[in-house]
Amino acid sequence: MSGGGLLVAGTTSDAGKSVVTAGICRWLVRRGVKVAPFKAQNMSLNSFVTREGAEIGRAQAMQAQAARVEPTALMNPVLLKPGSDRSSQVVLMGRPVGEMSARGYHGGRQEALLGTVTDCLEQLRSTYDAVICEGAGSPAEINLRRTDIVNMGIARAARFPVLVVGDIDRGGVFASFFGTTALLSAEDQSLVAGYLVNKFRGDVSLLEPGLDMLYGLTGRRTYGVLPYAHGLGIDEEDGLRVSLRGAVRESVVAPPHGEDVLRVAVCAVPLMSNFTDVDALAAEPGVVVRFVDRAEELADADLVVVPGTRGTVKALAWLRERGLAEALVRRAAEGRPVLGICGGFQVLGERIEDEVESRAGVVDGLGLLPVRVRFDRAKTLARPVGSALGEVVEGYEIHHGVADVRGGEPFLDGCRVGAVWGTHWHGSLESDAFRRRFLEEVARAAGRRFVPAPDTCFGVLREEQLDRLGDLVEEHADTDALWRLIEGGAPRGLPFVPPGAPSGPGDVGAGAGAGAGAPESRGTAPDPAPQSPEGLENPGSAPAKGQGVENPGSAGLKGQGLENRGSAASRGQGVENPRSTASRDQELENPGSAASRDQGVENAGSAASKGPELENAGSAGLGQEAEQHVDEEAL
């Protein structure tokens, strides 16, 4: 028999789907359940290489770690890697199959992949007791429902119950819960079991009237209220945090182990990929990491990192336009440390020959390393192990550029000249002993009396973060009710919330009357106090108690740790992306402009990671050339 499951959807991008999914996985595995994560379709420039050499979203790799299982391509069968606001590279089952425009993807090819993703899900269900799926963006993207394979499309195919997560810190969570439900067809609504409030600050009892009314309007209960927890940022899909230290420990900066701090500036290049490479640096006490987009911000940096990018030539032009290239050249001449990783390594070389990614031909690099790079259509996906600075190093490679190293001192299959290092290896700084030796070299070159702490273990810190996510779910959600959903599916008899999905040519389940088995009450307003769905006990008291477990705002749950977590006024500390959801879902903004934002806790995804991916990039004429470079047989 196939295992049970749950789809974690969100009212918006950045609602917290990725971390809630990870938290549920960690909670389940701690209670002895064999669990796996799954995201049918992901858009992210932050990816990972599995041991079999498949490329998947890094968020799914993090969720696999939360579940204490080895990540595989089955967990993220479709990965979209944007190269512009017009097209993305399509990675199918861990291998790139070409570039495609948004119009081409949503014009039929996405729907054709539904069989592939459902096959992957069924393989996981046959192996695991439970599969926790993550949706993308919002399930109520009515313009994309017909071709949806990541939200209600996969939920309906698998008959999985849906838990909708809303970020109350940004406001409007009740309207978002209600509106998300009311824009779905009757059949889709029958799978929406209820809601989970994320990132709440203040006295939970203040939510009680709203949760009561939400239940009265929708007939769906709230399964928990997760407090705003500082310092939880784990392997985001895309986006930036001002405090990368929050990725691995509390946001309070740990004092340096030596006499000085070490300042690290990361160039926030366009289409930045795998910026999580610097999280391990931020884990070190006394290391201050910030993203920069102006040349003057490099002046006081002890180390400058040029990170990976999906657009090497574009990043190079951006560095030159902003004066950062000139500043990097000056640093190298002065013997001040610079580290280039993957695309950043390629930028530091002498020459780039690119007829694949940008098709710009031959472009001069910054000339700081004796390296010439030629882009190959085949992508290198590897998990190398080697040594540097006398220590063992592990990493992973994801790149089209082939480096011809013509001198310098060998360094992780790249090279070093003076205080300039370059490598294609992502993740190398997570090797603790190597990271300490590297920081010692940087401090010496920078003239800083910085000493790395001898006991910082990045792997342990990451495990602590995953345990914190599991604790949040276990302490602030009704886990018994969640397990009933996972094991038994959505409660039967959930009322229809009008108006339902709007009708349109070719819509799937459009309109209130669509969908076999829709509730008889469809098309009419639900009773203000609908009867409890089957399986949810109603002891006959207030509507909130009819939600199965007592309203998270009631006294019954205060003992579970839902007391005051801070005044409501502090909500303003959670900085949200000022761009509209629609624009976030289609393109990567210049990450340099967002470098100073603090998302507070977690959310494992922003900017281009949001889905349903590329939804509004498919306007007339966009990416027509890109459609010609897809392996249609593979799709």
Image (spheres, rainbow, N blue to C red):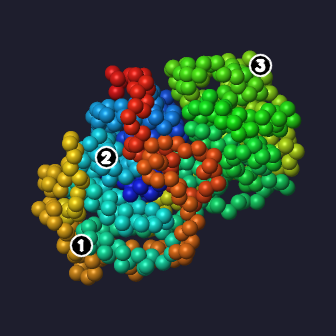
Residue 394 versus residue 73: which sits nearer the camera? Answer: 73
Reading the image, the residue beneath label 1 is 537
Screen quadrant of the C terminus: top left
Q: Earlier in the sequence, mark 2 or mark 1?
A: 2
Reading the image, the residue beneath label 3 is 407
Label 1 element class: loop
Find residue 53 and report its horizontal and vertical position in percent. 49, 29
Name the residue at 48% across, 38% down.
Answer: 85
* Residue projecting furthest to the left: 520
The answer to whether residue 250 is visible is yes
Label 3 element class: loop
Find residue 598 and report its horizontal and vertical position in percent. 60, 58
Q: Earlier in the sequence, mark 3 or mark 2?
A: 2
Q: Amino acid at mark 1?
A: Glu
Reading the image, the residue beneath label 2 is 143
Find residue 184 and report its horizontal and vertical position in percent. 26, 55
Q: Amino acid at mark 3?
A: Gly
**Residue 121 sits in which quadrant?**
top left
**Residue 154 sits in which quadrant?**
top left
